[in-house]
Image (tube, rainbow, N blue to C red):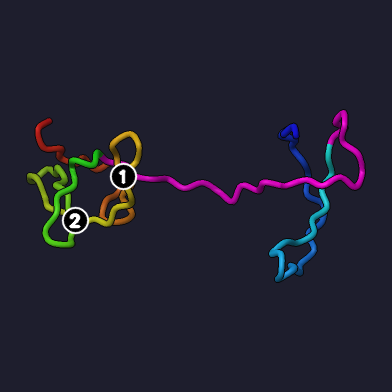
Amino acid sequence: MAVQAVPVTVEEIVAAADPASRTFTLKALLPQVDGLFPGMFARLMIPLGTEERIRIPANAVEHAGQLEFVYVRTTSGDERRFVRIGGLESDGTVVVRSGLAGGESVVVPGV
């Protein structure tokens, strides 16, 4: 089965979903595509938005019992900040769920 991405224009969305299959009907205007015929089945991928994430090196995170914290470099010196983090990423970083703002500098031990 070949997969092909095709941009579409959504023309109608039926406001009721089928609770058994968790699907709903949507009508979309597609461009002419070879091998595509009326009545064929398709899956539509709808982007729901973007999310900015703050990622820091995993070794910057320290633990105090079940709490996690990092040291943030400020103009008045390093400040301990409690954070909530996500899982370890394949590149050795973690996503910060709360506790830091974009643009803040985190102290990484040994660097």
Residue topped by disc 1:
88
Is residue 78 found left or right of 15 in the rendered image? left
User: Which residue is painted at 29% across and 39% down in the image?
Assistant: 93
- Magenta part, dominant SS: loop
For residue 38, which quarter of the picture?
Answer: top right
For residue 6, which quarter of the picture?
Answer: top right
Kind of residue sitting beneath label 2:
Glu
| Eye-nearest disc, 2 or 1 | 1
Kind of residue sitting beneath label 1:
Leu
Compared to 81, does 2 lie above or below?
A: above
Is residue 16 found left or right of 73 in the rendered image? right
Q: Position of residue 56 (x, y in %)?
A: 27, 41
Neighbours of disc 1 within 10 Å: few (<14), some (14-19), many (20+): few
Seen as rendered, the residue at the extreme front is 1
User: Which residue is painted at 8% across and 46% down in the image?
Assistant: 76
User: In the rendering, which numbered label is found on residue 68?
Assistant: 2
